[in-house]
Image: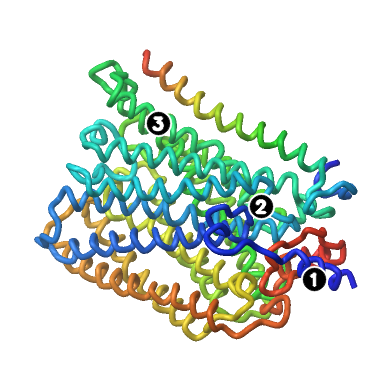
């Protein structure tokens, strides 16, 4: 009866604005989530094209598709676009869609702020991409923007810094909204330790954003004043210290890595129990492990700069604190495996991406441990081994989790089921060729190939060719993803039940498919909550 | 009223007045934390630059 009343209440409120006003003045969390996801997909395409151009240039020794300055611009912009333009907005899009549904809230707590945080982004992206077309070309000093190299670029330099400020403001406003929503708008009975893991990981991610995005903003502001207003924060000639920028940047940079990966942990923690048809093993341990990882991320930044030079005691501290992260991360990986143990497993596309995540993210984690060792890092630093490491963390890690999340929740968003066969094709092409693309880069790095170079010694050609071929096929196979999503929305098979997945638990699955435009205006009942949270 | 407990009667589009008050308070606190990190790190850098 309560469910019938709930559905009737939704139907009554299921009116929405039409035309362009619905999107420009959007305050509905679902509309804003959709816009974030579309923006992220667009930037993923642009960043992916830059990656294809990089792999084409590196196909063989002596290739001259681009001049070295353009190549450096492409690598710099590829990194910035993928981090700030693709992965982060994709997480905010998923947060917008799912957090209110999962905690039983009617919307995000600050809907107009939500609109502002999204609509800042197109201006930021335009400014960043437009820097390709100003005299001197786009910034080419790497996404880390180290001075004094960063100071040597023309008009692109202030454009990029302004774009980073805008993206930072957008992220901070988004994080404020997430924290305020989760802390205040949870349904009656939804205590903190009954929250879904995706909500927990996003809450911790939002605190990380609040702490470190202002630090990045401060660092680039100081570069800006060094360049235009004669200050000497990082200018050695004026008594400043360029190494100081590295410290400030990496105080932001390492937690940023966890901003990109913690929501992925949350999604994997949603998918694996559903397709194992078992509750998540060690729920509370997962929460504490996530919090521990977030805490440790603030005290490991020095491992990015071992070769810059620092006292042995500092090297030891940063090495040991970095290795300590393997403990909570190990807790998570073992808990996911324990959840699957003796479960009634089935391998629909979300589960396929989740299982691939387990194996491939672990490879990225292990190469991270190798890089954490000071003597080893002296060998690996600045080589393709590092490129292989962070791409294993971010592509089959973060990006696969985004794919898994979309394939998991798309039926809830659209009310339709996607083409399962095509989605499996998307998975298998991605999982095979992501390894062809990135695994050889470990060998290249160990053999001494430096990163960020437009050409290389001929002995590195073979593995570069393999890597490029993998990259081209991986890139091309991603075209399947928007095709599958659009086909699902337009002509997928309608879903009658609240959930297409028989093992799914969570408040979002207590709502009809598609989720009504205005949901949870009447809070969920205790029975829904007990069924949804499993306790 | 703490979140996760009973929802009170006065509610606009599913959000109670008490929740609105708490939303405002949390927004201020979190915004000030962000501002403190921004200003704090610039001040730290200035202090460190003077060595």
Of A6 and A401, the residue lying toward us: A6
Of A130 and A191, the residue lying toward us: A130
Element at label 1: helix
Residue that carries the numbered disc 2 in the rendered image: A200
Question: Which of the two marks, 1 or 2, is nearer to us in this view?
Answer: 1
Residue at left offset 27%, top offset 52%: A75
Reply above or below: A148 against A185: above
Q: CA distance from mark 3 to mark 2?
A: 29 Å
Please report, as a chain letter, where disc 1 is located. A
Residue that carries the numbered disc 1 in the rendered image: A7
Q: Residues within 10 Å of mark 2 (few under 14, many from 20)?
A: many
Q: Earlier in the sequence, mark 1 or mark 2?
A: 1
Q: Position of residue A84 (x, y in %)?
A: 42, 49
Q: Position of residue A10 (x, y in %)?
A: 77, 67
Residue at left offset 52%, top offset 64%: A401
Q: Earlier in the sequence, mark 3 or mark 1?
A: 1
Q: Is residue A474 left or right of residue A111?
A: left
Q: Position of residue A330 (x, y in %)?
A: 57, 56
State which quarter of the image contains the N terminus of chain A. bottom right
Please report, as a chain letter, where disc 2 is located. A
Which label was assigned to residue A219? 3
Of A54 and A27, the residue lying toward us: A27
Q: Is residue A305 left or right of residue A369?
A: left
Element at label 3: helix
Residue at left offset 33%, top offset 64%: A438
Question: Which of the two marks, 3 or 1, is nearer to us in this view?
Answer: 1
Whether discs 1 and 2 lie on one chain: the answer is: yes
Of A137 and A250, the residue lying toward us: A137
Q: Is residue A468 left or right of residue A262?
A: left
């Amino acid at each position: 009866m309560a469910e019938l009343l709930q559905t009737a209440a939704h139907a009554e409120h299921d009116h929405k604005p039409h035309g362009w006003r619905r999107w420009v003045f959007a305050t509905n969390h679902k509309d804003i989530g959709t816009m974030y996801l579309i923006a992220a997909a667009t930037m993923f395409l642009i960043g992916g094209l830059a990656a294809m151009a990089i792999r084409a240039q590196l196909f063989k020794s002596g290739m001259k598709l681009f001049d070295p300055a353009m190549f450096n611009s492409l690598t710099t912009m590829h990194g910035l676009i993928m981090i700030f333009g693709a992965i982060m907005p994709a997480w905010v899009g998923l947060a917008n869609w799912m957090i209110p549904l999962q905690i039983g809230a009617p919307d995000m707590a600050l809907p107009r702020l939500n609109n502002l945080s999204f609509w800042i982004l197109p201006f930021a992206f335009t400014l960043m991409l437009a820097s390709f077309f100003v005299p001197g070309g786009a910034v080419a000093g790497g996404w880390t923007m180290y001075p004094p190299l960063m100071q040597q670029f023309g008009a692109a330099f202030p454009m990029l810094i302004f774009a980073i400020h805008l993206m930072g403001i957008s992220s901070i406003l988004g994080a404020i909204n997430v924290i305020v929503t989760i802390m205040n708008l949870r349904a009656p009975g939804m205590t903190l330790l009954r929250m879904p893991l995706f909500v927990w990981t996003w809450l911790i991610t939002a605190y990380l954003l609040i702490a470190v995005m202002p630090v990045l903003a401060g660092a680039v502001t100081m570069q800006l004043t060094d360049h235009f207003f004669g200050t000497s924060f990082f200018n050695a000639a004026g008594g400043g210290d360029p190494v100081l920028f590295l410290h400030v940047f990496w105080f932001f940079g390492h937690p940023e890595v966890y901003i990109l990966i913690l929501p992925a942990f949350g999604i994997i923690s949603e998918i694996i129990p559903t397709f194992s048809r078992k509750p998540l093993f060690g729920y509370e341990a997962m929460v504490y492990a996530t919090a521990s990882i977030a805490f440790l991320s603030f005290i490991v930044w020095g491992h990015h700069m071992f070769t810059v030079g620092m006292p042995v005691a500092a090297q030891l501290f940063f090495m040991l604190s970095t290795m300590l992260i393997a403990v909570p991360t190990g807790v998570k990986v073992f808990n996911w495996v324990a959840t699957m143990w003796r479960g009634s497993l089935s391998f629909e596309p979300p589960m396929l991406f989740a299982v691939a995540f387990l194996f491939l993210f672990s490879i990225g984690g292990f190469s991270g441990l190798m890089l954490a060792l000071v003597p080893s890092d002296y060998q690996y630093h600045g080589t393709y081994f590092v490129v292989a490491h962070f791409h294993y963390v971010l592509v089959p890690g973060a990006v696969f989790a985004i794919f898994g999340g979309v394939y998991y929740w798309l039926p809830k968003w659209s009310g339709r089921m996607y083409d399962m066969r095509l989605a499996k094709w998307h998975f298998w092409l991605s999982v095979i060729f992501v390894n062809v693309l990135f695994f050889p880069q470990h060998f290249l790095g160990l053999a001494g190939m430096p990163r960020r170079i437009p050409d290389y010694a001929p002995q590195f050609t073979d593995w570069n060719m393999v890597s490029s071929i993998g990259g081209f096929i991986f890139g091309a196979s991603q075209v399947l993803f928007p095709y599958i999503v659009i086909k699902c929305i337009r002509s997928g098979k309608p879903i009658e039940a609240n959930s297409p997945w028989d093992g799914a638990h969570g408040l979002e699955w207590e709502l009809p498919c598609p989720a009504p435009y205005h949901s949870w205006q009447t809070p969920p009942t205790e029975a829904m909550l007990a069924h949804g949270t499993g306790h | 009223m703490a979140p996760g407990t009973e929802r009170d009667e006065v509610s606009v589009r599913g959000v109670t007045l008490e929740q609105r008050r708490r939303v405002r308070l949390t927004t201020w606190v979190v915004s000030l934390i962000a501002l403190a990190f921004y200003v704090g790190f610039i001040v730290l850098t200035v202090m460190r630059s003077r060595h």
